[in-house]
Every structure is written in structure tokens, then in C-alpha cells.
Amino acid sequence: MVDHDNRRDGVTRARDLTSGANMDGIAASGFPILARTDFSDTTFLLEIYHPTMARAARPGQFVILIAHDHGERIPLTIADFDPAKGTITLVIQAVGKTTREMQRDFRKGGNILGMVGPMGEPSHISEAKKVICVGGGLGVAPIFPQARGFKQAGAYVIGVVGFRSSDLIFWEDKFRQVCDEFMICTDDGSAGLKGLVTEGIEAAIARHPDIDEVVAIGPPIMMKACAEATRPHKIKTIVSLNPIMVDGTGMCGGCRVRVGGRIKFACVDGPDFDGHDVDFDDLMTRLQRFKEDERMALEKWSENCRRLALEPSQTGEKGGS
Ligand SMILES: Cc1cc2nc3c(=O)[nH]c(=O)nc-3n(C[C@H](O)[C@H](O)[C@H](O)COP(=O)(O)OP(=O)(O)OC[C@H]3O[C@@H](n4cnc5c(N)ncnc54)[C@H](O)[C@@H]3O)c2cc1C
Ligand code: FES
């Protein structure tokens, strides 16, 4: 049986899994990347061989990943997992230093130095008969295992996904296989319904007055809007929070969020919470805390990349591919 109590177990797992050596005999050099797909200029998918993690993973859980020896730890949702193939799938948006470095360096055949997980409480796949699964932007990837989980549990699943424009759309086929109804919303109207996912939610509620539950994953501002859209209808709404995380085991306090007036740690108490109780303004303020450091780290890294690309012979190093 998988022990999901990360507060107690996370450190042990960190020790076991971060080294890259595990029960499946994977070499100590890391976890092999079996496939990479680029969805757009900024978003890419990695399929990683990790049989233990693939067996243990549940919808809603995440990994803490270290790309290389000098890398920082970053949390990424397990967007899919396949116990038969022994793989987990991550979908990554290159937004800052670490994720851009990963976008540049991680290729099929390469290795990821370390991964800890699965972390966090698995999403509760309730006995809801009719659910709307909402994904916005990068939230489209993590909502997929939940949509599949509800479908497997016998629910009528309405998928609503939102992108800025049609060129950013991914996984449409995958969603259509697990959704009874599927709606794409684009900000510019280049595909599907022109408008935000909240308009998709309103349209679905108008057609189905018997929705039991809404699950929404995406940027905090989107999840806040989804929770406000369902509040007047009194529809239970679950969101997945993405505060800054460091250890992911409930010890550093970095991921504290305010839910129902109480402090919770998203890494061990979540990341899923009741959207009607979440203090999204507090979350958004906390996410801004390190903006200047993040900007400086990216600037420094980009400058180094430019320098190495221009002067490979002087530095003795190769430029980025
Ligand atoms: C539970 C959880 C699941 C996530 N799943 C995904 C996913 O599947 N795909 C994906 O692309 N991103 C995901 N993220 C966000 C991802 O962790 C950040 O984009 C990443 O850490 C950015 O690092 P950076 O160095 O590239 O950018 P930075 O410039 O350092 O940061 C860019 C922005 O990312 C956020 N961020 C930075 N560091 C962290 C951190 N340690 N923990 C959380 N957020 C951070 C902040 O909002 C920051 O402003 C998830 C975050 C959480 C908490
Ligand atoms: S990431 Fe440290 S307590 Fe949650």
C-alpha cells in the first residue's frame, strides 16, 4: 500500500528517490527521459521512466524535481502516469531560470538528476455523478488525470479548458476520450468558444442544473474566478493551489496558504482545497514575494547563456542548443 502521509514519510522518500537510485534499479545518474514533446514555444512535455513513482502516483499529486547538481528544487504536477510502461508525464511551462534551463537541456535520452514524490494528498475523486473539470493554461495538464479519475468512477464528465489562442492547445484527443462533453475556450476566439473558462462553466451549468462538483486548476486569478462563478449556485468547487514550495514535506512553511481563516501547508494538506474557502488574494500576494530575485536569477542566467554562445573558445564551454 502506498503511504500518502508526506509529513512523516517525505524525508525518507527524498533520501531514497533524490539520488536517482531506487527499487527498480535505475542507475544512480538519474531518471531517463523517454520522450519529449513541445506543445508551443514555452510549453513542453517530458515522459520519464520511473516505475515506482508510476505505480504510486494518484491524480493531483506532484514531484519535487532537481534538474542537475546545482539546480533548485521545483514542484511539478504529475500530469499523467502509466504503471504498465513505468512512466510519469510532466508538462512544463518555461517561465523562469530553472524551467527555461530544463527546456533548453532536457532531451529524449537525457536524465533528470533527482525527483521526490509522489507528494501531496491525492485528489479526492468523489462519488459525484456529474462534474465539470476546468483547466486553464498550464492547468490543462494536471486536470487531465482528475477528469479520467472521475470518468473511471462512473461520473458524467464535462471538460472545459482554456487557452490564450488555438496554437497553444494540447491534449484535445486525450480529453475527448475521457469527457462526455468537452469545451475549448480561447481568449481570442481562434478556437472553440471565445472567452474565459468561467463562460464555459456558466454555459455548462445552464445546460446541466444538476452539476455536483467543479474542479478547477490554473493560475490563481482563474481559480478565484471559477470559485466565484460557482458560489451563487452552491456547487462544491475544488482548486489546486500553487504557492512557492521548498521542501514539499511540511517543514519549511514556504507554501502556507489561508483556507477558511486557517493556515494550511499546500504541500501536505493540499494542494487541493475548497475554492470557496481559499484566500486567493493572500496567495497572489505571497507569490509576488520573490519576483525581484526571480527576475535577477533569470537575467543572470540568460546573460551567461549569451556569453557562452558568443565566446565558446574563450570559456572552454559549449553554448546552449
Ligand atoms: C504543487 C505545484 C505544482 C506545479 N505544477 C507545475 C506544472 O505541472 N508545470 C509547471 O510548469 N509549473 C508547475 N508549477 C509551478 C512551477 O513550480 C514554477 O513555475 C517553477 O518553480 C518556476 O521556477 P523557475 O526558476 O523556472 O522560475 P522563477 O522565475 O523562479 O519563478 C517563476 C514563477 O514560478 C513560481 N515559482 C517559483 N519557484 C517556485 C517554487 N519553488 N514553488 C512553486 N512555485 C514557484 C512563482 O510564481 C514565480 O513567480 C507548480 C507549482 C506547484 C506549487
Ligand atoms: S513546501 Fe515547505 S512546508 Fe510546504
Image (cartoon, rainbow, N blue to C red):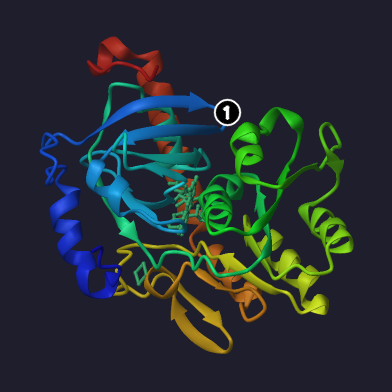
- In the depicted view, which residue is nearer to us: 258 or 289? 258
**Percent position (x, y) of residue 58?**
40, 56
The secondary structure type at the circle numbered 1 is loop
Which residue is the site of mark 1?
39
248 on left or right of 185: left
- In the depicted view, which residue is nearer to us: 193 or 292? 193
Q: Residue at x 22, y 39 (%)?
A: 113
**Percent position (x, y) of residue 209?**
84, 68
Name the quarter where the N terminus is drawn: bottom left
Question: Which residue in the rendered view is the most extreme toward the top?
Answer: 313
Q: Residues within 10 Å of mark 1 (few under 14, many from 20)?
A: some
- In the depicted view, which residue is nearer to us: 232 or 110? 232
Q: Quadrant of residue 105?
A: top left
- On the question of residue 72 being in view, the answer is no
**Percent position (x, y) of residue 235?**
73, 75
100 on left or right of 5: right
- On the question of residue 16 being in view, the answer is yes
119 on left or right of 152: left
The residue under label 1 is which amino acid type? Phe
Question: Which residue in the rendered view is the most extreme toward the front?
Answer: 154
Vertical position of residue 231 compared to residue 261: above or below: above
Q: Residue at x 14, y 46 (%)?
A: 19
Vertical position of residue 73 compared to residue 44: above or below: below
Q: Quadrant of residue 220?
A: bottom right
**Percent position (x, y) of residue 91?**
48, 40
Q: Which quarter of the rendered image does ligand 2 occupy?
A: bottom left
